Image (cartoon, rainbow, N blue to C red):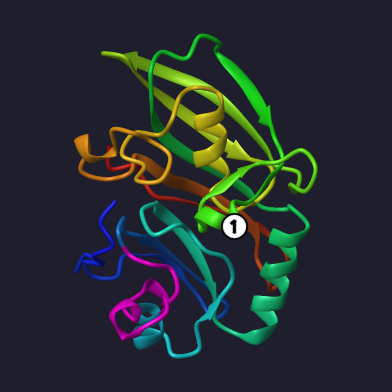
Amino acid sequence: MSDAYTPPHDPLEVIYDDAELLIVNKPTGLLSVPGKGAHLADCLLARVQAAYPTALLVHRLDRDTSGVMVFALSPGAQRHLGLQFERRHTKKTYIALVHGQVADPSGEVDLPLIVDWPNRPLQHVNYETGKPALTQWRRGAVTDGVTRMRLFPMTGRSHQLRVHMKEIGHPILGDPFYSSNWQDYPRMMLHAQSLAVRHPDGGRHMSFQAKAPF
């Protein structure tokens, strides 16, 4: 995998905003937060704060994952949303293209995950020290040995969907960490399609979508 960081220059795509919430569609190839070093300073958080100076981070998506991300526009909203993620009160749906033909119409992967220290930031399954990680999934269309999947993470571990798909023998296409043929694809085929949260002001349920670009 190349270490070169060449983030896209797409304009900020705002899905929704109000006094407390900002929902954007993150492009693939862009860090959610800055990395170590000036060359990794460009990130979605910096771009969001250039347009919304009060914006605060709530959660992250991997660099190569695209899709729905929520930011808070006040400290109170950040606390409210942060608790929803911590308590697993949010609902997230991802779309992925995976290698091979998935046999069953639906299922779940329940495998504990933890960082693989000698190879960080990679994660791996560890039954002794791993943290609980649960992914539910539904199979979509199968075309030319590629299966379209709807993935529902019930927990929020780092690289959870990527490792879980690899562990069941169907790695996500284009994944530079967990797929051997990642260079055959223009991007990692993983997209955060929808996110449902309760609004920090009043608690009403709201759902936001960004259509998968593949």
Q: Is residue 58 left or right of residue 63?
A: right
Label 1 SS: helix
In the picture as drawn, the residue positioned furthest to the bottom comes out as 53
In the picture as drawn, the residue positioned furthest to the top comes out as 103
The answer to whether residue 67 is above or below residue 40 is above
Instruction: Let me know if residue 42 is in the magenta part.
Output: yes
User: In terms of depth relative to the viewer, which is nearer, 164 or 199?
Assistant: 164
Count of numbered badges drawn on the protein: 1
What x and y, as percent, mark residue 107? 63, 20
Q: Which amino acid, by three-letter code, is at mark 1?
A: Trp
User: In terms of depth relative to the viewer, which is nearer, 17 or 122?
Assistant: 122
Look at 20% across and 43% down and name the residue there. Answer: 186
Look at 69% across and 34% down and name the residue there. Answer: 111
User: In terms of depth relative to the viewer, which is nearer, 77 or 184?
Assistant: 184
Magenta residues, start to end: 30-45
What x and y, as percent, mark residue 110? 71, 32
Q: Is residue 170 left or right of residue 125?
A: left
Q: Quadrant of residue 118?
A: bottom right
Find disc 1 in the rendering and name its residue. Answer: 117
What x and y, as percent, mark residue 175? 36, 42
User: What secondary structure characterizes most of the magenta part?
Assistant: loop
Q: Using a 10 Å C-alpha cutoff, classify the residue at mark 1 as few (fewer than 14 neighbours), some (14 to 19) or many (20 or more).
A: few
Look at 45% across and 24% down and name the residue there. Answer: 170
The answer to whether residue 204 is above or below residue 71 is above
The answer to whether residue 121 is above or below residue 20 is above
The answer to whether residue 69 is above or below residue 127 is below
In the rendered view of the protein, which quadrant contains the C terminus? top left
Look at 25% across and 56% down and name the residue there. Answer: 2
Q: Is residue 18 left or right of residue 50?
A: right
